[in-house]
Image (tube, helix red, strand yellow):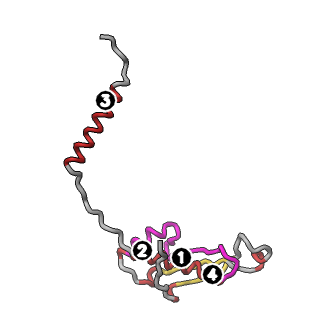
Amino acid sequence: MAKLEWAPLPEDALEERFLAATGPGGQNVNKVASAVQMRLDVFALRLHPDVYARLKTLAGSRWTKEGEIVVTARAHRTQDANRAEARERLAELVGKAHLAPAKRKKTKPSKAAKAQRVDTKKVRGAVKAGRGKVRLD
């Protein structure tokens, strides 16, 4: 599947904080704050109410009471790589919220499909009935 491109997020809606990361990096991990915690102020995006509701659902536990989405990126050894990953994840989340789910079209089984279903049920019932106790009448 092709990777979708999302629009960049406005700078005034983002807040970055750098943390000491865990994971690969050796002694560098102990000295450098390479992990990025990025907060996105959802109200600054001025989203449509439907998009807002979908975004809140998609964000799940990353959504705060203040209406922010918090994403932490610490997979890479450098701040720049972690910053880019956090921005990409936030943009992807907002982009997915803009995609409205497809409406379900109601369908009805045909008469033939209903008849076939009843026939298979009868066959299955006959098989099960044949498993009962054998009576010598």
**Residue 43 magenta-highlighted:** no
Q: Which residue is mark 4?
A: 17
Residue drawn at x 77%, y 79% is 31
Q: Nearer the viewer, mark 3 or mark 2?
A: 3
What is the CA distance from the residue labelled 2 to the residue labelled 1?
12 Å
Reading the chain from its start, which is encountered first: label 2 or label 1? 1
Reading the chain from its start, which is encountered first: label 1 or label 4? 4
Disc 4 is placed on an element classified as strand
Amino acid bearing label 4: Arg
**Which residue is at the front of the view, 104 or 31?**
104
Marks 2/1 in contact by CB < 8 Å: the verdict is: no
Disc 3 is placed on an element classified as helix
Residue drawn at x 46%, y 69% is 58
Q: Categorize mark 4 by other alpha carbons within 10 Å: few (<14), some (14-19), many (20+).
A: few
For the C terminus, the image quarter is: top left
Amino acid bearing label 2: Ala
What is the CA distance from the residue labelled 3 to the residue labelled 4?
69 Å
What is the CA distance from the residue labelled 4 to the residue labelled 2?
25 Å
Q: Which quadrant of the view contains residue 16? A: bottom right
Magenta span: 51-79
Amino acid bearing label 3: Ala
Q: Nearer the viewer, mark 3 or mark 4?
A: 3
The mark found on residue 89 in the picture is 1
Q: Which residue is mark 3?
A: 126
Disc 1 is placed on an element classified as helix
Amino acid bearing label 1: Arg
